[in-house]
Amino acid sequence: MTVPTRLVRRTNRERRFSLRTTALFFALLAIILCGLVALGRTAASILESRPLWSAYLVVMGVAVAVLCRSRWRRFSAARYARRAAEALEEAAERASDSLADVTSQTDPGAPSEVQADAQDELDADGFEHAIAGLCARDACREVEVVGGAGDLGADVVAITSDGLRVVIQCKLYGDGNKVGSQDLQRFGGTCFTVHEADVAALVTTSDFTAPALEYAQQCGIVCVNGEELEAWFDGTGPSPWEAAGIEA
């Protein structure tokens, strides 16, 4: 699996030219200028119609300006523009992280579909493609998904790096539904004679019954249950052709 590279947030940012900051600064400046123009027009109309009210408002304005002098000194349109730009940058970083996570989960080169937590979300066709992805990951070539009507028991066919022809049947079963001997017998009747397999394997998300395992051992079919499939995916267990122990 590919691990998404997360953006590292800078804690000590040096002031530098930023087109986003500059644009936000001029936007705020335009808003302030428009407000001042509107305020001036309102004051002019009041001055014409009610001079007494105008004098009162002027006195109140001067008083408020004196009381809030320190706050006005601290006000900086550029500072607020920078803060707004930094907030946008943080939001963009979070969006980028989320996009990286989604991309890593949908990366066609990463066989993440066969994780144990995601197996119950697959359908039979998706499970076959997931197994084919594992074969491709483990250096197999000519990997094909051939499952469907008339497949005669073969769902995935591949050639290992040693030149062995691998034929795999996939069974997406629940925990309470084990692969029985009849499934193995149907697969065993075609995997070697029809599909000319050097290695025949039946892979399931569940488990096998005792008679099924006995028949598979007699016929030389590799059985991979849910735990062994998870180990194959994690790299802690062998692939089916490695478990067969057959040399080219």
Image (spheres, rainbow, N blue to C red):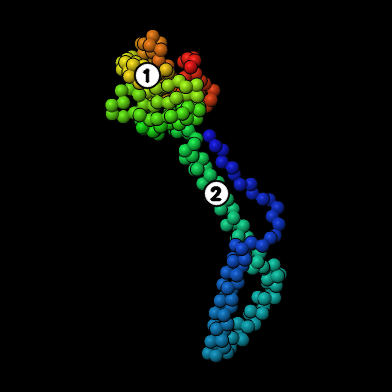
Q: Which residue is mark 2?
A: 96
Residue 101 seen from this side: yes
For marks 2 and 1 on the same chain, the one whose residue lies earlier in the sequence: 2
Residue at the (49%, 36%) spot, across then down: 109
Q: Residues within 10 Å of mark 1 (few under 14, many from 20)?
A: few
Q: Which residue is mark 1?
A: 196
Residue at the (33%, 16%) spot, across then down: 193
Q: Are marks 2 and 1 in contact (CB under 8 Å)?
A: no
152 lies above or below 75: above
Left or right, 141 with reference to 152: right
Q: How many labels were placed on the picture?
A: 2
Say what amino acid the circle numbered 2 marks.
Answer: Ser
Residue 55 is situated, as x and y percent measured from the top left of the image, at: 61, 86
Residue at the (42%, 21%) spot, across then down: 165
Residue 119 seen from this side: no
Question: Which image quadrant for residue 50?
Answer: bottom right
147 lies above or below 217: below
Residue at the (64%, 68%) spot, across then down: 77
Q: Residues within 10 Å of mark 2 (few under 14, many from 20)?
A: some
Residue 190 is situated, as x and y percent measured from the top left of the image, at: 32, 18
Question: Which image quadrant for residue 236?
Answer: top right
* Outermost residue toward the left in this view: 150
